[in-house]
Amino acid sequence: MKVFRPLIFIAIVFGSASAIHAQHFDWATGFGSPHEECIVMGMVTDADGNLYILGQFPHDASWEGHRLLPIAPYGPGFNSTDNLNTLIAKISPSGEMLWKKVIHSNNYQNNLPLDIKKVGDTAFACLVEMSMPSSDNYTYYLDTLLPTWSNYPVPAWGMDIKRCTAYILFDFDGDVKEQHFLHLTYTDTAGNDIVRYDNDEPDPWYWTSTYYLATFDVDAQGNIFISRVANDIRDSNYCAQDGTMCGIKFWVDRRLVGYCPIENRPLRWFPQLMKFSPHFDTLLASRYVVQKSDSVFNYIWFTRTKVDATGNVYYLHTHHIHEEQANTIFVDSLSDLVLFYHEREDEKGVVVRFDSLLNPQWIITLDDSVINPEKSKSRLYFHDITFDYDSNLLFILASTGRGTFSDTTTFCSILKYHGTPLDLKNDAFFMSFKNSDICPELYSYGRVDAYMNSNALSSSVGNTSVGNIVCNNNRVFFQHNFVGGVRSQDQNILLPNWYSNSTGLSIFNYKGDAISTIHYKTANPSTKPSSIFLQDSVLFVSMELYHDSANFSGIPISEQNNYFACIARYVDTSFMTPYVSPIVNQILEPNNETICIFPNPAHDILNINFKASPIVGASIISVTGVREPVLFNGTTCNVSHLLPGIYILEISTANNKYHQTFVKQ
């Protein structure tokens, strides 16, 4: 007699257990230095599968033995040992560097990469914070040596401008299609430029500003959205201390393109979101994103800006608070969000959605209900944001720590979203929301055990790079540090042979169920994940190695350099199709007296003893829901080609299908 019963399938993933032969790493490469950190800040690809990276490197960094900076007279000069520089490079699908561009100065200042985005089908753009050449130093800008900046389009006020922000548009061959240099200046009540004086001399540091820690995106019409952090020594000090700042002028290539008056300003301002017309001809809109009504010192860790397919703008940041009192974060009319901080130092993540005219629509953060205010930290970082348009879901990558560095079991607060408690403690996690024009509904979340150290919980998923989370076809990908487990809302998948404080990538479905993991076998807790990028069946991953090595499923990275920016290419043909969970309810099965498979676990051959109808076919379903080819002769299956893991054997008769689980060792 046949019986109907649910088949319960619990997937245990072993190491890099992606149990389909189409999953593999092609190559791993990168650049390193013995002295300073190397980072992949962001990545994009073209239709041919070439990879374009935006990176940060010190003066002595090299790529596979070849130095990134050219030799003298274009290379390092005086005081350049600690300088950080920008790398823009193209990598072929086989891992070969096809071309590179660098931005480097020999003065005290850094040239910091900020963001990279694909623009249309033929170009990509980079945002870089740049140092200016002067009479005693130079800048090597892309392929050009700039002994002085006199011939470049920066505001000409007769002063030595020290820094600017460059927006550079490239074609895929590395040729510059368009470039713009951006500045800010501040005005007093009469609209005059504010100049600060030190020792009776004007100091341009205090009246010109770069777009500090900026990110950007471009909509379908070519409008450019930039978010910037209001640098505290400029915006905040003028507001809180000097009291005379009443507006900001926006300059592009020596042209004044817009003015933002500040009326009824609070004592402290926070990041600013700007909308420019194509080619930066006009400032179309400007809005301070977060305002505060007190003068307590606070600062922003980083920002993110993304535009969706319908032109809505999403702004994300994590800010750091120095205080012990309740406070309010608001964006114009969105003023009902009250955050309670119970110690001197806390972090809080915020996401705001605006329409295309920068009118605010909603704001997201997590409530933090204090239950033990004497137990140290309560940290919540928002790291990145992405979309799935087919399912109308919004994904936010975050991490939280609500214990102490020495005691991660006693928690000082409860995280909630609109009153719903979330089982998130010391975790790296993603949250998915049903996107809408009103405050979105929480759909699901998936989490992993996060690593806490005395530096910052943000190292668990990285906070310096852009593009930390991607999603497609019912799969969510993000990298993280971990302490031994991957968990979701309804299950706990333990991972044997994983090392504490290591780094890897986890894959979840949109409901928050863990699908699989890839372990890089790192050992140093200071190693951090960086950008990832998905194109069809290819996933590019990167991370910052600190005195460490990594192994990408048999491809080792072991560098002599102390600091190494690692990039690896991973291929999985199943990414092209929607993921379907192998957990099946109400499957028709025979009882235990009529079916038997052995040995279980199996190494090479799986024997089948089936006493019901004759078997006409057999197949194997992997943990990722993909059917594997199998050699079946009526009573045995050859499983030697499978990677270790748990599978479902499906046998077919003339009228029915039957399922049984087994373990491949």
Image: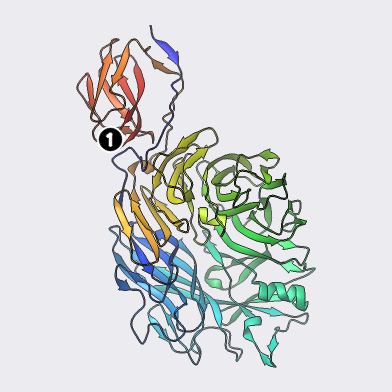
Asked if 414 appears above or below 302 in the picture, the reply is above
Query: How would you rate the neighbour count of disc 1 (Cα within 10 Å): few for under 14, some for 14-19, many for 20 or more?
Result: many
Q: Residue at x 45, y 16 (%)?
A: 5
192 left or right of 126? right
Q: Residue furthest right?
A: 264
Q: Judge by depth and name the residue closer to the eye, 108 or 22.
A: 108
Q: In the displayed image of the protein, which residue is found farthest to the front?
A: 406
Residue occupying the point 59% across, 51% down: 406
- Which residue type carries mark 1? Leu
Q: Is residue 216 above or below residue 583?
A: below
Residue occupying the point 39% across, 70% down? 33
Quadrant holding the C terminus? top left
**Judging from the image, what secondary structure is the residue with disc 1 in?**
loop
Comparing 644 with 576, the one in front is 644
Q: Quadrant of the N terminus?
A: top left
- Please state the horizontal and vertical placement of residue 568, each as a whole percent of the image: 35, 56
Residue 250 x, y percent position in the rendering? 63, 76
Residue to which mark 1 is pinned? 642
Residue 586 appears in view: yes
Q: Position of residue 491 (x, y in %)?
A: 51, 33
Q: Residue at x 28, y 40 (%)?
A: 21
